[in-house]
Image: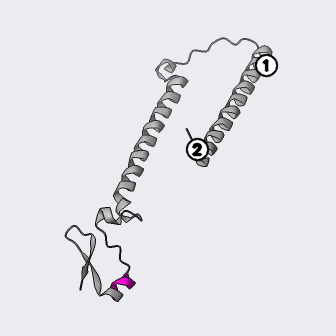
Amino acid sequence: MASNPAQDMQQEFLNNIRKSQEAVIDAIRTWVEGVQSMTPKVPAVQVPGVENLPRAEEVVASAYDFAEELLRSQRRFAEEVLKATSPLMPGDSAKSGECTTSPEEHSQTRETAVRGSAGRRRCRVA
C-alpha cells in the first residue's frame, strides 16, 4: 500500500512522541526507585471523605473519554461543513446547478445570472 508524504510525516511525528514518552516514563521510574530507597516508610494518613474522591486512573479515563467524544463531534462537524460548502468548491458547480460563467463572460454573451427557485445562481439568455 502506497503512502503519501503527509501520512509519512504524521507517522514519524507519532513515533517520535512515543519514544519521548517512553524516555520520560523510564526517567520517572528511576526517580521513584531513588526516592523510595532514600526515604523512610511513612504511615498512611486517614483523610475523611477521601474514599468518595475518584481515583487518579478514573480521572484520566474520564478526561480522555471526553476528549475522544469532543474530537469525534468536531470531525462530524467539519465533515458536515465540507458537505454544506461543496457546491462552492471548484469542479462541483455542475452538480449544484451553479452558474459557471464569469460576470465578464455574461456581459460579452448577453447572459445574465439569475436566482433560481432554490436560491442557486442559474444562467439564462437575456
Q: Earlier in the sequence, mark 1 or mark 2?
A: 2
Quarter holding the C terminus is: bottom left
- Residue at left offset 70%, top offset 13%: 42
Q: Amino acid at mark 1?
A: Gly
Q: Is residue 122 left or right of residue 39?
A: left
- Residue 62: x percent and y percent? 47, 30
Magenta span contains residue 105: yes
- Residue at left offset 57%, top offset 41%: 2
Q: CA distance from mark 1 to mark 2?
A: 41 Å
Give the residue furthest to the left: 117
Quarter holding the N terminus is: top right
| Secondary structure character of the magenta stretch overall | helix
Q: Does the residue at mark 1 contact the one at mark 2 (Cβ under 8 Å)?
A: no
Which of pointers 1 and 2 indicates the residue nearer the eye?
Answer: 2
Secondary structure of the residue carrying numbered label 1:
helix
Question: Where does label 1 land, which residue?
Answer: 34
Q: Amino acid at mark 2?
A: Gln
Q: Is residue 34 left or right of residue 85?
A: right
- Residue 106: x percent and y percent? 33, 84
Magenta span contains residue 1: no
- Magenta region, residue range: 103-107
Q: Which mark is residue 7?
A: 2
- Residue at left offset 37%, top offset 62%: 92
- Residue at left offset 40%, top offset 50%: 79
- Residue 30: x percent and y percent? 76, 21
From the viewer's side, name the closer residue of 94 and 38.
94
From the viewer's side, name the closer residue of 55 and 9.
9
